[in-house]
């Protein structure tokens, strides 16, 4: 299973620019789980309970009420403090295009008034939640790096991850 880590490519922001104030490691985990959850389908396997190998492991992709990925995702979101959950909702809205970065304070205030309760359930109802959160992070010049992706990106020492297809390996 791939893991995601946070990466910050931006210099320090001035006091006038909006501040994300979210733990990037937790947001990265939520993005990973949201993507796992987004691929689930209702009724993907009509022969549920049959031999998983014969069925191509389709039960893993079936959306069920007792889904462990759903529970992990809900737990990760609920594990944030109230302010962080509100900011996560606002970040999803930013990534979805509902708000712009210069409207961050308004997005946070609206999220606080509309979704301070049951934010986790609201967020799980957003299709493409992982993409929205990652796009929102990009607006803050923050990002995540998929540790399994050896084609692009930089590691924590700003070295390329893996070998580029058209470049020789570093010695």
Image: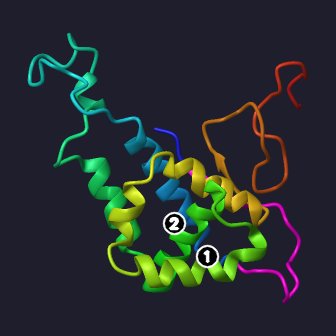
Q: What residue span does the magenta drawing correspond to?
A: 4-19
Kindly tell me whether residue 157 is visible in this rendering. Answer: yes
Res 25 → quadrant: bottom right
Mark 1: which secondary structure? helix
Relative image position of residue 145 (x, y in whole percent): 67, 48
Relative image position of residue 81 (x, y in whole percent): 43, 83
- Give the residue displayed 20% in from the left and 21% down from the top: 45
How many residues crowd mark 1 within 10 Å: few (<14), some (14–19), many (20+)? many
Mark 1 lies on residue:
107
Mark 2: which secondary structure? helix
In the displayed structure, 167 sits above or below 73; it is above
- Give the residue displayed 40% in from the left and 35% down from the top: 39
Mark 2 / mark 1, whichever is N-terminal: 2
Horizontal side of residue 121 vs 20, given as left or right: left
Mark 2 lies on residue:
26
Is 124 in the magenta? no
Relative image position of residue 74 (x, y in whole percent): 33, 62
For the C terminus, give its image quadrant: top right
């Amino acid at each position: 299973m791939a893991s995601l880590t946070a990466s910050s490519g931006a210099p320090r922001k001035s006091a006038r620019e909006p501040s994300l104030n979210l733990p990037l490691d937790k947001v990265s985990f939520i993005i990973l789980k949201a993507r796992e959850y987004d691929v689930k389908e209702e009724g993907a396997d009509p022969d549920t309970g049959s031999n998983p190998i014969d069925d191509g492991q389709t039960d893993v992709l079936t959306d069920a009420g007792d889904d462990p990925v759903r529970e992990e995702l809900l737990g990760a979101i609920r594990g944030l403090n109230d302010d962080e959950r509100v900011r996560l909702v606002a970040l999803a809205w930013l990534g979805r295009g509902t708000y712009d970065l210069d409207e961050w304070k308004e997005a946070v205030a609206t999220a606080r008034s509309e979704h301070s309760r049951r934010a986790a359930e609201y967020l799980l109802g957003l299709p493409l939640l992982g993409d929205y959160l990652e796009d929102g992070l990009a607006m803050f010049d923050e990002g995540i790096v998929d540790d399994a992706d050896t084609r692009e990106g930089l590691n924590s020492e700003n070295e390329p991850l893996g070998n580029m297809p058209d470049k020789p390996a570093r010695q």
